[in-house]
Image: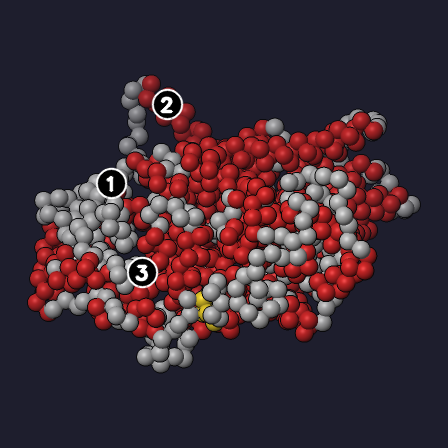
Amino acid sequence: MYSRFCLLSLLLGCLIQLSLCSDIAVSAQEEQGNTTSQERSGETRNKSNKAFPVVTVDFAHVRSPFVVALWILLASVLKLGFHYLPKLSSVVPESCLLVCVGLIVGGLLKSVGETPPILRADVFFFYLLPPIILDAGYFLPVRPFTENVGTILCFAVIGTLWNAAFVGVGLYAVCQIKGSGLENITLLPNLLFGSIISAVDPVAVLAVFEEIHINELLHILVFGESLLNDAVTVVLYHLLEEYSYSPQIGATEVVLGILSFFVVALGGIFVGVFYGLIAAFTSRFTSRLRVIEPLFVFLYSYMAYLCSEIFHLSGIMALIACGVVMRPYVEANISHKSHTTIKYFLKMWSSVSETLIFIFLGVSTLAGEHHWDWIFISCTLLFCLVGRVLGVLGLTFILNKFRLVKLTPKDQFIISYGGLRGAIAFSLGYLLNEKFPRILFLTAIITIIFFTVFVQGMTIRPLVELLAVKKKQDSKRSINEEIHTQFLDHLLTGIEDVCGHYGHHHWKDKLNRFNKKYVKKCLITGERSKEPQLIAFYHKMEMKNAIEMVASGGMPKFPSSVSIQTLQRRSTLTERLLPTLTKEREEEVRKILRENLQKTRQRLRSYNRHTLIADPYEDQWNQMLLKRQMMRSTDQRASLHLTVPASGRDSPPGMKSGIESDTMYFEPRDPESDMPAITIDLATSATKQPTDAQNKDAEDKGIVFAANDESGSPSQRVQRFLSDPGPDQ
Amino acid sequence: MGSTPSLPAWEIRNLAHTTGFTSEQIEILHRRFLHLTDGKATMSKDCFDNIPDLESNPIKSRIVNAFFDQRNLGLQSVGTIDEITFENFLTTLSFFQHMGENHTKEDLEYYKTEKLQFLFRMYDINGDGKITLEELREIIDDLLSKTSNTEKTSSSIADAAMMEAANICGGQMEPDQQYDGITFNDFLQIMQDLKIETKMHVRFLNMDTSAICK
C-alpha cells in the first residue's frame, strides 16, 4: 500500500514536471533571448551594473534532453507501477494500459494548453523501432524458424498482399457508393491505405504474445510473419506512392514492382548478413579490450539498419539477418560479462522503446486533428478482420497439403486473431503526402490500432484458455536432448542419402559442415573454432549448474535418491571421490585466504574506465563457497558437477595423490601479485593449474572451472563457454 | 546400365500393403535399390559405400548396421545378417514414414513405439535391452567424430547424460541398487518430453529425382 502510494506520487511528480517544463520552456525561451543579448552587450561594455547572479534558471539549453529523459523516466516508472497492480495486469495487457496512460497524459497536456508531442515518424523509425527488432532478431529461436520458414513466408508475402488488396478494393467499392461523401478517394489511395493497414505489427505482436505463452509453433508463425512482412509493406508503400504520381499503370510497372520486392527483401538480408559477418570478425579481436564488445554488436546492427534504409531496402529484415548471423560467432568470442551486458541492454532498450511507442500512440491520438467518418472507418475494420480470416483460412488450406505437421482450426483461429496492427502503420500513415486524405486515414489507422490492441489484446488470453490451445512447455535443455537431437539429425541425413534424394536434412547438414570447416575458422578465435557443438553445450550446462549452485547456497538440484553409487561402474570409487579436509587444514586454508583477500582489498585500484575490475573479494568468495560446498557434499553432487574420470583404470593413481596433498586444492597466488585468483581444481588429479595473471582478464574469469584436463592448459577458456548459446537458443 | 527390371505389379501391391508406401514410392526406391546394388537382387554392407554423401556422416556404420539388424526386420534373434532383400530395405525405411493424422490413436501409439524401438536399437548395439554407460560413451564419441582430446570430455558427457536419465527414471531406487542402463521403458520416458517421434521422418518422394542426385 505504501509502495503504491510512493509510486503514484512519483508519477504525479513526473507529470507535473512535464507540464511545467513545457510552460517554462516557452516563457524561458523568450526571456532567455532577451537576457543573453543583454548580457552580451553588458559584457562588451565590460562593466555590469547588476550583481552577480548566484542562482539562475536557464532551462532552454537543457530543454530537449531534459524532456526526452523525463518521458523515458515517466514510461519506466509507469512500467514499474503496473507490476504493483497484479489484478489489473493479469486482465489487461501492458500495451493497453500504456496506451491509456498515453491518452491521460495527452489529455493533461492539452488541458494545460500545450500541444502534446506527436510520435514523429523519423524518431520512431530511427530510434524506437530498431532496439525492439534487434532484440527479437538476436534472440530469435532459429530452429523453429527455419523449420517453418516456408509457412512464414507464405503468410508474410501472400497473406499481406491479399489483405492489402482486399481492404483496398473493398474500401474503393464502399467509397464509390453514392452519398458516402468519399467519392473523391480513388483506387490508388485506397490501395495505399490498404497496404499500410494490412501489415501485422511486430511490436504489438510481441507485446501481446509475450504474455500469453502459447506454444512455440504458433508464436513463431505469427511473430515471423510480422517480421518478414516488412519487406512487402515497404515495397507496396513506395510502389503505390510512386504510382500515384504517374498517370498510368502498365505491365512494366507491375513487373518492376515484383522485381523491386525481391530486391528489397534479398537486399535487406544481404546487407544484414554482410554486417553480421563483419561484426563476427571484429569480435574475434576484442579479447584485449572486453569492455566495448557489446558496443560492436549494437553498432554493427544499427549500421545494417541504417544502410538498408539508405537504399530503401527492408531495414527490419536487415536487422534480423544481422542478429541471426552474428550471434553464434560473437557469442563464442566474447566474454561472459559482455554476453550478459548485451542481453540486458537489448532487453532494456526494447522494453523502454515499446513503452514509449505505446504511450506516444496514446498521446498522438489526442494531438492531431481527426476526421471521423463512420462508414469509412467501420468498413475498414470489417474488411481488415474479414480479410485476415479469409486469408489465413485460404493459405492454411493450401499449406496443409505441403506441411507434415498440419495446422488445426484452433491454430488458424489464433493466427488470424493474432494479426495485430500497431505503431508501424501509424508512422507510415503519418508520412503520407498531403494530397491523400491523410487525416481521415490517420483516424482510421488509429481506430484499427486501438481495436486490435484493446479488444483483441485483452480477449486473446481468455480465448487461449477457452480453446485450450497448447501452451509453451518450459523444458530445460538437457544433455540427453542434445545428444538425441544431434543423433537424429545425422540419422535422418543418412537415410535421405540412402534414399537418394536431397531433402532438407541434407542441405542443413551441408550447411553445417561448410560452417564448421570454413566459416568458424575465420570468425571464432583460437581453440573454440574447432570445438564440437556437443562439448560446448556440455560445458555451458555444467557452468550454469555450478553457478546456480553457488547462487542458491549449495542445495543440490537433483533429488538425493539417486546417488552415484547406483551407477554401475562407480562402486569402487564412490567413497573416495573427494576427501574432506580435516579441521585444522580448513583453518589453515581459511587463514591463508583471509590474509590474501585482505591484501587484495587494500590494493584495489581506483575505478579505471578502461579496465573494469570487478570486486575480487566477491569472485573469490564465490569460488571459496563453491569449493566448500563441493567438499562437504555427497558424491552425488560431485558426480553432477565434476568431471570424473570415466573408467576405473585411469583414476586411482591420480586421485590418490590428490587425496594426500590437500593443500594443492587451493592455489592462492603469491601475495605479491595483485590479484590472487583461486583456481578451483575440481579434477581430483592434483595438478597445479596455472592461472592467468593478467589483471584485465581476472574480471572475465568469474568462477575458474578447471576441466579435468591433465594437459594443464589454462582454464580461462572454459569460462567463455558460458556465453556460447549452444544450439538453438 | 540398360533398362532396370521393374517389379511385377502384384509384388508392388504386396509391398505397399506391408510397408505402407505408395506404389510410386516403391518403384522409385526399387530403382534406387538396384542402383546401389548394381543390379543384384540383394544388398550387402559394402553397397552402402557407393553413396558418397554417407561417408562424412559420423554415424554411418550405425546406420548401415541398422539396415542389417535382424531385430528391425522382425526377427527375434539378435545380430546382423549379411544380405538384405528389397523387402528388408523397404521395411527399414518404413520406420521413417510420416504418420498422418488419419490413423487411429492406437495406430499412432503403435507407430510411435515402433519408431522409438528402432532408435533404441541403434543405440543398444549388443542387443541386451539396455543402453549401458559404455554404449552411451560410444555414441558420444561418434557424434564428436573423435576429434583430438575429447576422450575425457566424452566420458564426462556420458556420465552426465546417464545421471540425468537415472534421475528421470530411477527416482525410487534404493541407495544400494545399481542403475545398469537405460531400458526401453526408461528411454520412452526420457523421450516423452522431446517428442522425437514427431521429427523422425523423411519425406519420401512421389517423383523420381534420382537423375539429379547420386
Q: Are marks 1 and 2 in contact (CB under 8 Å)?
A: no
Residue B123 appears in the figure: yes
* Above-or-below relation of A292 to A149: above
Q: Are marks 1 and 3 in contact (CB under 8 Å)?
A: no
Q: Which of label 1 and label 3 is nearer to you? A: 3
Amino acid type, mark 2: Arg
The N terminus of chain B, quarter of image: top right
Foreground residue, A275 or B80?
A: B80
Residue tagged by mark 2?
A40
Residue tagged by mark 3?
A646
Residue A47 x %, y %: 29, 22
Q: Quadrant of residue A40?
A: top left
Amino acid type, mark 1: Lys
Q: Which of label 3 and label 2 is nearer to you? A: 3
The C terminus of chain B, quarter of image: top right
Q: Residues within 10 Å of mark 2 (few under 14, many from 20)?
A: few
The image's colouring method is secondary structure
Of mark 1 and mark 2, the one earlier in the sequence is: 2
Give me the C-alpha separation between circle 1 and circle 3.
36 Å
Instruction: Please state if A46 lies on the left or on the right of B37 as rendered.
Output: left
Residue A640 x %, y %: 33, 64
Q: Residues within 10 Å of mark 1 (few under 14, many from 20)?
A: some
Residue A359 x %, y %: 56, 51
Give me the C-alpha separation between circle 3 and circle 2.
83 Å
Judge if badges 3 and 2 mark residues of a common chain.
yes
Label 2 sits on a secondary structure element that is helix
Residue at the image point whose x is 64% and y is 71% from the top: B110
Q: Which of label 1 and label 2 is nearer to you? A: 1
Residue B57 x %, y %: 51, 47
Residue at the image point whose x is 20% and y is 58% from the top: A654
